[in-house]
Image (spheres, grey):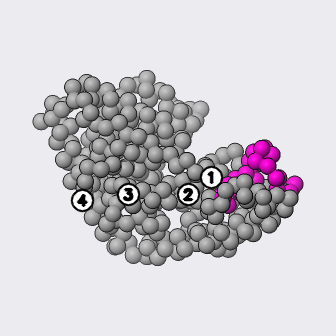
Amino acid sequence: MSKKSLVFSGVQPTGNLHLGNYLGALKNFVSLQKDMNCIYCVVDLHAITVFQKPNVLRDNVLETVASFLATGLDPNKSIIFNQSSVSGHAELAWILNCVSRIGWLNRMTQFKDKAGSDKEKASVGLYIYPNLMAADILLYKATHVPVGADQKQHLELSRDIALKFNSDFGCKDFFPLPEPLIPKNISRVMSLRDGTKKMSKSEESDYSRINLKDSADEIIKKIKKAKSDSAPIPNSLKELEKKPEALNLLTIYSEISKINLDKILDEMSGKDYSFLKNKLADLLIGEIAPVGNEIKKLMGDKTHLLKVLKKGNEKARNLAEENLKNIREKVGLI
């Protein structure tokens, strides 16, 4: 692998990748592999910070790999592997646990959100998983990390840990300070049932999201039932911003069609939302249904998916071990 910029990103194998994952991450992953060295990881160690049924987790790992391939990731251009197959992630995470500070972790807002009101019952893994995320990135000396706005705080922690390691062990610039890659033109995809909440695979109602494996009929039904507005589509962004569900539908339409939101409003203002929903459903069927069909096809050949992982695991393991030798030497481990 050449010395040009290196991208690292991971996706949790918790099932039901959806439209938000597709627009916010997967399509961007495919674009990045054209010009940069890329490592894409199925972060199964992150997934077990909350309990996972073992057989379900195994299937979800393979389904995530299938989703990578179905959306256009090429295992000959990018390294695709699962985190637990490279023991260096856990080894470096422990070293970085000893570099990171409790005060830094206490500032992580995502732990507070996920742990809820009774954080005493949350797993230790959930609390310290930002350190594992830092290990994922720094293990390969990644220079860039595609992240959503909700993960930017964790990337800043990775930079703080890298700086402290470099300072503690007198090895300036040993770990690069990874830069965030936040796509400027992609807005957050929100729930189809509540436009103030991010589209999520953990939301109880399946009607809140478009899953990548949804059939054409399921997409039509979900878009028809999506919360919108009884009034006609407004003619200005300022007015639209007061209607989060309507804004979400129009934003999705803009992202899929690659048409500016202002131009869409010029075409649709004054019309009923049924007009928008029919057009949006057609667009989504054209974009998402082929991906879902390919995921299902790939899941029918798990031997192929395991071969893709085996090849990627070996590449990642070789890179990780090369860097770990230097890390152990810096720390004083034999």
Q: Position of residue 281 (x, y in %)?
A: 69, 68
> Is tag 4's residue or tag 1's residue first in the polypeptide sequence?
1
Q: Amino acid at mark 3?
A: Asp
What is the chief secondary structure element of the magenta stretch?
helix
Gap in angstroms between the C-alphas marked 4 and 2: 29 Å
- Residue, x 61% and y 49% (percent of image)? 187
Query: Helix, strand, or loop for circle 1?
Result: loop
Residue 189 is tagged as: 1
Query: Helix, strand, or loop for circle 2?
Result: helix
Residue behind mark 2 = 23
Q: Amino acid at mark 4?
A: Glu
Q: Are marks 1 and 2 in contact (CB under 8 Å)?
A: yes
Residue 314 is tagged as: 4
- Residue, x 36% and y 55% (percent of image)? 36
Q: Position of residue 137 (x, y in %)?
A: 35, 43
Q: Are marks 4 and 3 in contact (CB under 8 Å)?
A: no
Q: Are marks 3 and 1 in contact (CB under 8 Å)?
A: no
Q: State the residue in front, 260 or 157.
A: 260
Q: Is residue 229 left or right of residue 110?
A: right
Residue behind mark 3 = 35
Residue 300 is tagged as: none
Quick check: can you spot residue 7?
A: yes
Q: Which residues are magenta?
A: 231-254
Query: Helix, strand, or loop for circle 4?
Result: helix
